[in-house]
Image: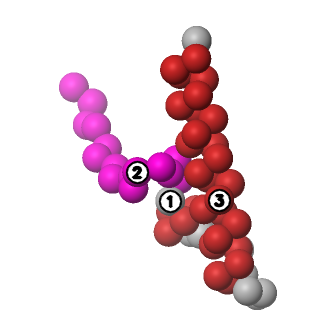
Amino acid sequence: MAETQNTHRPPGTCIPWEEKKKELPEITGDKDLVRRQWEQIDGLAYIYIWHCLLSF
């Protein structure tokens, strides 16, 4: 049987910031601004997914 990957995601997130920033190049500007924007967009994606699941 294939191994399952145990990933812990905080409630309300699809991809946590700590995981996403590993994929990005070095941020030269305001890192806190980029983090806040990512968390807002990620939260909207989470709400959208739940809306699609519950509406149909």
Q: Residue 51 occupies which quadrant of the picture?
A: top right
Q: Residue at x 71, y 78 (%)?
A: 33
> Is residue 2 highlighted in magenta?
yes
Q: Residue at x 68, y 54 (%)?
A: 41
Front residue (pair 22, 45): 45
Marks 2 and 3, Cα distance to the nearest angstrom? 13 Å
Element at badge 2?
Answer: loop
Q: x%, y% of residue 38?
A: 66, 63
Magenta span: helix, strand or loop, mainly?
loop
Residue named by callout 2:
11
**11 over 29 or under it: above or below:** above
Residue type at mark 2 is Pro
Q: x%, y% of residue 37?
A: 70, 66
Element at badge 1?
Answer: loop
Q: Residue 56 occupies which quadrant of the picture?
A: top right
Residue named by callout 3:
40
Residue type at mark 3 is Gln
Dot 1, crowdedness within 10 Å: few (<14), some or many (≥20)?
A: some
Q: Is residue 24 visible to the viewer in this orientation of the structure? A: no
Residue type at mark 1 is Pro
Q: Name the N-terminal-most of marks 2 and 1.
A: 2
